[in-house]
Image (cartoon, rainbow, N blue to C red):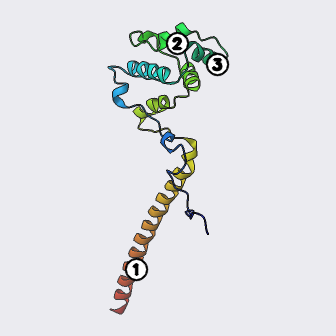
Amino acid sequence: MAGPRKPAHPDLFGWSSAAQAIQEFEPEQVRAATLAGVICKAMKLALAECGEDRETIAYRMSGFLGERVSKNMLNAYVSEGATEKAIPLPRFIAFVQATGDMRLLNLIATPFDRLVVDRRCEGWIRAGQLAAAAREKQAELQATETEFNFALRMAKGAARR
């Protein structure tokens, strides 16, 4: 008896971590009056959900950067009231690395109308781009053929006179 039939093409959402391909915070989770406040709320949420204590995250950040990051510094970065203590970009990158929370990257990309996706989706995205470009070229070819045929009919009509 034959086993279950396998589809000819892989299912885009069939891989086990499809839900993790695009990760974003729910807007109500990080709502704040300022961008600095949004970032602080998001970082605080990432800390709460990562399953590690702040001491461990600070230690991981230190290892990633090659410079000391203390728990107190980390506390200052996630304090909404202390916007003058905004986290510098290299430390933000280290924070993302230490917590593993990719939603933070989309938080930064969103104001630019961009989206950060898992690299495993790159092939599907490229295939979609190529398909869209092929449809555009096909439409251009059809329009050119229509124009050519019209010009040809006009030339034949003019030659008969």
Q: What's under tag 3, amino acid-wise?
A: Leu
Dot 2: few (<14), some (14–19), or many (≥20) neighbours within 10 Å?
many
Disc 1 designates what residue?
Answer: 149
Give 86 or 160, whichever is nearer the viewer: 86
Q: Please say if 121 is above or below 136.
A: above
Q: Residue furthest bottom?
A: 160
Tell me the SS state at disc 3: helix
x and y percent of residue 95 in the render? 55, 21
Tell me the SS state at disc 1: helix
Tell me the SS state at disc 2: helix
Q: Earlier in the sequence, mark 1 or mark 3?
A: 3
Mark whose residue sits in front, 1 or 3: 3
Mark whose residue sits in front, 3 or 2: 2
Give the distance between the C-alpha atoms of the residues marked 3 and 2, in whole angstroms.
14 Å
Residue at left offset 43%, top offset 23%? 42
Disc 3 designates what residue?
Answer: 65
Q: What's under tag 2, amino acid-wise?
A: Leu
Disc 2 designates what residue?
Answer: 74
Give the distance between the C-alpha atoms of the residues marked 2 and 1, in whole angstroms.
70 Å
